[in-house]
Amino acid sequence: MILRKSKREARAQEVVEVETETADLDDVTVDIESLPDAEVEVFDDSKSAPAERADTGPLDETEASPVRPYVDLGGVKILPRDGLHLRLEVEEGSKRVVAVGLDFAKSTLQVQPFAAPRSTGLWNEIREQITEQIQKQGGTTSEVDGPFGPEVRAEIPVMGGDAQSSRLARFIGVDGPRWFLRGVIAGEATVDPDAAEKIEELFRSVVVVRGTTPMAPRDLIPLTMPKASPTDAGPAPTAV
């Protein structure tokens, strides 16, 4: 039996643009890999994820449809759609891809997949440490119950800007099977409900590919340039 993509899915695959850029988002990004482990305080290490995560996403590679036209970026797969612009953020020194940036609905969504323990989660601990780091930078934070569970909403001073310049951001996270997916939302989705709904649906559509390689918790699951796979509707987009 030959499985064929719909014309709509094929067109969506074609409109995805992929660019690479040097990672320079210090005003909204907190490096999870460098967060210090707590020495005294005991954190809640239970998993934090929507009850229906395995059905509605973000998905593990074993839960995703094998015939959908994903763009394969190694540690994550992204489902193309009209109007989506995809960027790979590259660490300047090592040239390592450290994050995937998605521009959509006048908003940006940065995603990063991390290795995690099988039976415990990372988001409850990391969320508190993100809050602490942002406050040290002079920003303000609040924790709310969002569509994926607890999330951090922050107002962060823009690096190099004037004293009154700041940026709004939403930090979201989901613990999956042996992985943790972190998202940072900026732009219209921080203030506009319609844009927020579109970006949240985009986050749900992300597929995490943990792989079988042993990794320490909080290690970034390797991300790569787009590559062709049986689930692609056509050739992988060319990086600019």
Image (tube, grey):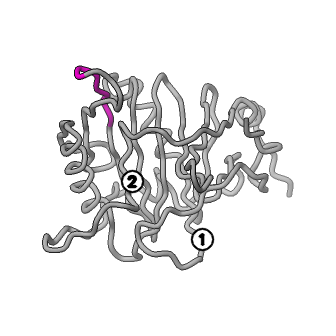
The number of discs equals 2
User: Disc 1 and disc 2: Cα gap in Å?
Assistant: 22 Å
Q: Is residue 225 left or right of residue 131?
A: right
> Which region of the structure is painted magenta?
163-169
- Image coords of residue 193 (percent x, y): 34, 25
Judged from the image, the secondary structure of the residue bearing numbered disc 2 is: loop
Tell me what residue is drawn at x 24 percent, y 49 percent: 133
Residue 168 painted magenta? yes
Quick one: label 1, few (<14), some, or many (20+) residues within 10 Å?
A: some
Residue 51 at x, y percent in the picture: 34, 58
Image coordinates for residue 151, horizontal then vertical, percent: 27, 46
Q: Quadrant of the N terminus?
A: bottom right
Q: Residues within 10 Å of mark 2 (few under 14, many from 20)?
A: few
Q: Look at the picture and state if 12 lies above or below 133.
A: above
Residue 109 picture location, percent across and down: 46, 38
Magenta-colored stretch includes residue 130: no
Q: Nearer the viewer, residue 163 or 187?
A: 163
Along the line of sight, the residue nearer the viewer: 67 or 88:
88
At label 2, the amino acid type is: Asp
Q: According to the image, label 1 marks what residue?
A: 211
Indicate the quadrant where residue 82 lies: top right
Q: Quadrant of residue 190?
A: top left
Tell me: 20 left or right of 162. right
Q: Image quadrant for the C terminus?
A: top right
Mark closer to the observer (1, 2): 2
Q: Does 231 appear above or below 201?
A: below
Q: Residue furthest left?
A: 41
Q: Which mark is residue 31?
A: 2
Position of 89 with respect to 150 (left or right) is: right
In the image, residue 213 sits, relative to residue 148, either above or below, namely below
Q: Which mark is residue 20?
A: none
Query: Which of 195 and 107 lies nearest the eye of the viewer?
Result: 107
